[in-house]
Amino acid sequence: MRDVLYWMPALGVAARHYLPLAEALAARGIAVAIHEWRGIGSSNRRAGRHMDWAYRQLLELDMPAGIAVARGQWPGAQYWIGGHSLGGQLAAVYGALHPQDFSGLALVASGAPYWRQFPQSWLIGLAYVAAPWLAQLVGYLPGRRIGFGGNEARGVIDDWARTGRTGRYAARGMAGDMEAKLAALTWPVLTQRMQDDWLVPQPSLDWLLGKMPLASRRSYILASGDLGNAPADHFNWMKTPAAVAAHMADWIESAT
């Protein structure tokens, strides 16, 4: 196998939902290793009052462990990293911390959560205050009940909301300047934004890309016609990912 994509899911989305993407890329000769978030899907842990974690555990423990398994499976391949939504953000951060480990970054329906980059920004900003408060009160964010993400750990929501409020990436307990690392990244970056995606408006994506000024970029905006006439929103592309996979495969081929 020549190329492997290490893929990070969106917040609260189990790895199995990206199997159609993995199959479409495999048909183009690209292997895909799909990360499973701690606390989601096949993970043997669940967030609760007595079990908590944050970006530090995801970036320093879980992602390195998953990537090591993938490298053991395909030891001689060229590796790419990418993700959907929050997965794309943490793929960018992890890649910036380990730039020698990958050849490029692929983002699908992903952008920074900074509140000023959204319509009705005051409402988004309020959510970044309310979500950590609710997570502390309940012991975890009850995403399944409120319709946002999964049941998420307090620490993850705290780190996510801090980025939403400040526009900057940081993780409690992690040393180093993530923003400076992102600014030094020189990889090629592929972005695919969904036309009807209110969770990632264009300014949100632009804010994330602005953190990587040295990276070369290729960008696409996908419309309903690219997704079998389904709405081009934050999640529908996962069911009909042929166009997303084709752009990704072409980009990988041209970048190698």
Image (cartoon, rainbow, N blue to C red):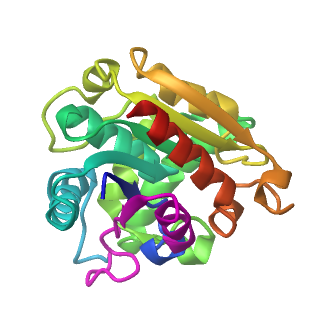
**47 horizontally vs 22: left or right:** left
Image spot of residue 136 (x, y percent): 37, 64
Depth check: give the residue in front, 25 or 112.
25
Residue 32 in view (yes/no): yes
Depth check: give the residue in front, 58 or 161.
58
Residue at left 27%, top 42%? Answer: 94
Locate the C terminus by quadrant. top left
Magenta stretch contains residue 27: yes
Image quarter for residue 71? bottom left
**236 horizontally vs 135: left or right:** right
Depth check: give the residue in front, 70 or 205.
70
**243 horizontally vs 66: left or right:** right
Image spot of residue 244 (x, y percent): 62, 52
Reply above or below: 153 against 245: below
Residue at left 18%, top 34%? Answer: 100
- The region drawn magenta spans 19-47
Image spot of residue 23 (x, y percent): 51, 70
Reply above or below: 187 against 236: above
Reply above or below: 221 against 127: above
